[in-house]
Image: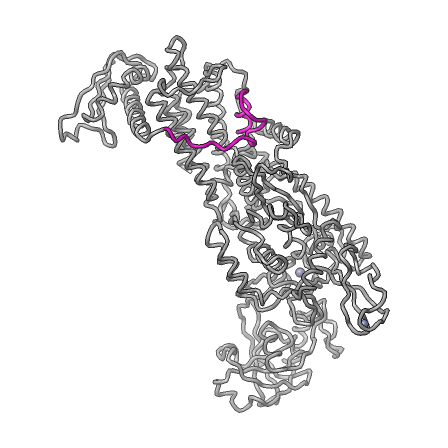
Amino acid sequence: MSRLESKASEDSSKTELGSSLNYTLSKSYDSVTEEANWREYWRQHDIYHFDPHDKSRKAFSIDTPPPYPSGDFHVGNALNWCYIDFVARYKRMRGFNVHFPQGWDCHGLPTEVRVEQTFKIRKNDVPPDQFVEMCRKLTGEYIAKMKQSMNLLGISSDWALEYKTMDPSYYKLTQLSFIELFKSGHLYRGEHPVNWCPRDETAIAEAEVVYQERKGTLYYMRFGDPTGGIEIASTRPELLAACVGIAVHPKDEKYKTIVGKTVTVPIFGQKALVISDDEVDPRYGTGAVMICTFGDKTDVRWQMKYHLPVIKALTENGRLSVDDPRFKGLKAEEARKKIVAELQAKGRVSKTETTQQNIGTCWRCQTPVEIISRPQWFMKTRDMTQKVVDWAGKLVWVPPFSKQRLIDWAESLDWDWVISRQRIFATPIPVWYCTKCGTVIVPEESKLPVDPRKDTSPEEKCPECGSSELRGEMDVLDTWMDSSITAAIHAGWPNKSDLFKQLFPADLQPNGLDIVRTWDYYLMVRSLALFGTAPYKTLLINGMVKGTDGRMMHKSYGNYVVADEAIKKAGADAFRQWAAAGGSTGYDIPFRWNELEYGKKFLTKLWNVTRFILANTAESIPQKNLSTLSLIDRWLLGSLHNLTKEVSEAFETFQFNTALEAIRNFTWHALADDYLEAVKHRLQLGRDQADLKATQYCLREALLTICKLLAPICPHMSEAVYHQFPSTATKSVHQESWPEPDQTLDEASIRNGKLLLDLIAHARREKSAKGLSLGSNIKRIVISTEAEHLHLLKENEETILRTLKADSMDLERFPPNSNQAKEPGTGFKVEIVA
Ligand SMILES: [Zn+2]
Ligand SMILES: [Zn+2]
């Protein structure tokens, strides 16, 4: 970070700004107190209120991610919310009626697992109602914590729009969407193998399976005749009881003669059919593999393709369900050991090998997933792949590469989305069944919400067979079924009024790269099925935060930073600067304390500049008068115009780092280093009034513009500066209009002004090279330059003399083609006569 350090030391060598001011602004900016005060001010004045009746402004809707209330608002979350807030604040100033709700995705495994850990129980140890109550209570506590963190960060969500997916008013809508999808044929109930977590005893979706590299053992086992037969290598001997077939490659000569025959499975004695299939890798193990129902997804395919029988070897809690008393009820790993010992005793294991495995594990508890078949509810998502791909191509993706994440994911799925879960704390599936004929009964919309686990069926008799033996569904919905309709729910669905048209599809879908395949995907399929359109227009995707050591941030690595601590230490505006400047949008960014320190230094600089300007500007507001503007004034306003253009473009394209760098550079260098130093003499008393007014006008204009441009990223500091201008139009900088670049200023002023400032900087260096202080008077300054600059310098003689405290100036023309006379990188040669 030498760049940052050099900037900081450069600053301290400058004349201290504001040393002569008599203004009451506190000398230093205390971020903790100031930020808390402004947050209270915003709350009291309801600055971020979305007005549904406002017809004068166009709505801008943000489908904010509803986080799992884990209580921990980590820096990754903080980065995500900073991005959202930058856009929300920018759009408000652009005149939009910004709809920025915040919700909480309460249901699901994480909360249940936490309750189990916190209270040291398993879900079935207490009655379901009591378990749900424990989940609700814990969730409430976590929400309060996270809300506090969001507030501390200065997030401008409209809390009047807060929602919780565990509220009956919300899950009523989840149930309604289920019924609509069921009636339109997008859902079905069936018995299909699904991924299953034996620890959590529930089905899980493909998106919830995390693949991990692990070491395993490959056992070479002899099937059939103990002396002949066939040798098969497998890492999962515990599944022998569920072995229903053996697969070999069609071109594998060794096995040609046994394809189509059956072989006896050792220990358990069932017959396994030998089939040949191109999918077999003849180089793996012995080239013959066992097919178990179900060891993995390939087994699922082969079972169906070759009409093999199904043997359920595992129970829902991952224990062996065979009849053999030696193995019944054993956990998979214990069963493996016992079965291997038994095989070895019979001389049926010829060798073992260590092997690297890519194992699917539960995203929540890291337990290896099994594949278990039982009745489940599914959404027909495989049929929608092409639609998802087509729609993905029509949307704006920031950064563009994130689009491919969604497409690749959609195309990789070979099973439908399993939406039922065998858990407790979740939205109940609004369905009853006739136990006689299996007819599915769904309630009327007016009866929602329902809980078929306790409520009686809305119909007394089965509409098909008249039986009164009806039972409620005990399974619940995947939590993504709650959170994948947020965009529509924000817009007021099922009420499709004007507001719905204004807010749906959402203008902005902001989330991390890690949930493109879940949240963005599920939102897309739900919305396509329910509304025939994508639920969002622009996707703003943030990367992940890396630790100070460059690795992904993780508690176990010791590189983990709690967002609250960082904010309390450096202030929210400094933290937000790290989020903006830390990297390009969509890429992973490292967490660096010195970036936060630099952010703080910048705020101190801006505070000091503000104090200086306030101390030196008249109470009346100076008006712009082009005729009194000097070249340097026009340069400043021209540069400000360019800055406004650059920052506006950066916000329009979500390049927050570009926006912030431009603002910081302008404030630090153009305004403080160059302009202020060049005009200090004009602020002194006894000078020309018109000249003074022009300088004051420029200073105020620059400061107010900076404070507006900075408002989306540093909302607290900008508000503090804004309130130093009593004549401003609104109660808050966040209700101000975004600055429009001034079109009347020309590029020539910027070019010539820069030349003049370069000369002044150059002469100052010469002065100090001679051992003279910047404030000391000098007799004469001799400037040699190109013929074309002479006129410009003559015109600005007064500025040059006053800034450099010189009595007179001599101008000389370089002889033609005498480049040697110039110092490298400048158009001048300067001589100081003391
Ligand atoms: Zn699990
Ligand atoms: Zn029936």
Tell which quarter ligand 2 is in.
bottom right
- Which quadrant of the view contains residue 3? top left
- Which quadrant of the view contains residue 689? top left
Q: Is residue 177 visible?
A: yes
How many numbered dots are placed on residues in this image?
A: 0
Report the residue at 62% width, 50% height from top. 487
Position in image of residue 111 (x %, y %): 70, 52
Residue span colored magenta: 718-744
Indicate whether 749 appears above or below 410.
above
- Which quadrant of the view contains residue 125? bottom right
| Relative to 773, 404 lies left or right | right
Position in image of residue 206 (x %, y %): 60, 63
- Report the magenta stretch's main SS: loop
Report the residue at 55% width, 41% height from top. 82
Of the 4 image quadrants, the one containing the N terminus is top left
Of the 4 image quadrants, the one containing the C terminus is top left
**Colour scheme shown:** one colour
Position in image of residue 68 (x %, y %): 65, 49
